[in-house]
Image: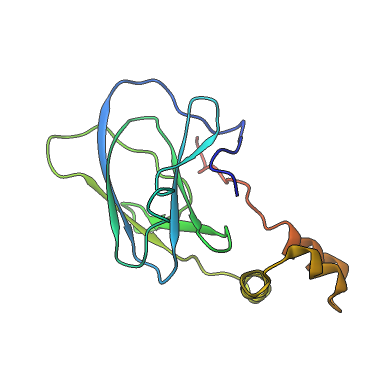
Amino acid sequence: MPSHQRNSALKSDNSGILAYATFVNCSQRNVRVYWINFQGEREDYTLERGGLEPRQYLSMTTFEGHPWIFRDGDTNDKLYFKNRQNRLQEVFFPEAWDGREAYLVRIQIPVYSLQELCCQRIRKLLKNKDVVDSLGLPGLVKHQLRNPDDSVNLPVGS
């Protein structure tokens, strides 16, 4: 996956208000951490280090109004974080720094359906997506294997 992808609905605002975050991989997967820039493109802040391995963290100076998303480094599946209300959320929006510690962003695996889990496993095992058509699978499953859902779901009220 390219380090830059466009998502027209989600982009950074130029607030100039400092925020600090520490992204912690609380999953057993390799995690990619993406900042959504001012044009709505993804910028992989873990590209040089090959992602965040389990229990690794990335401390980041960012700004209020700069959204961040997380993806599985191997399958590109969505990963989430627990917000202050202890709910899983897909997009992290930093809050203005209050002078104390950085916001701790615990990246986790959501509850996937059995179908999603099966597709993730098959995608991880396949070295070449071109062989998907040769598998004896229903057309819908083949489509999901070739095109995992990578849309970003904005929280209600955004």
Q: Is residue 58 left or right of residue 119?
A: left
Residue 141, position as x, y percentages in the image: 79, 69
> How many discs mark residues in the rendered view?
0
Quarter of the image where one finds residue 10: top right
Residue 35, position as x, y percentages in the image: 44, 39
Q: How is the image coloured?
A: rainbow
Quarter of the image where one finds residue 17: top left
Q: Is residue 50 left or right of residue 75?
A: left
Residue depicted at x 49% and y 25%:
38
Q: Is residue 38 left or right of residue 130?
A: left
Going by the picture, which residue comes out furthest to the left? Answer: 100
Q: Is residue 121 left or right of residue 94?
A: right
Residue 75, position as x, y percentages in the image: 58, 63
Residue depicted at x 59% and y 38%:
5
Which one is in front, 121 or 86? 121
Quarter of the image where one finds residue 154: top right
Which one is in front, 124 or 23? 124
Residue 122, position as x, y percentages in the image: 67, 74
Above/below status of 31 relative to 152: below
Which one is in front, 118 or 2? 2
Residue depicted at x 74% and y 64%:
129
Residue depicted at x 86% and y 79%:
136
Above/below status of 145 relative to 42: below
Above/below status of 108 relative to 62: below
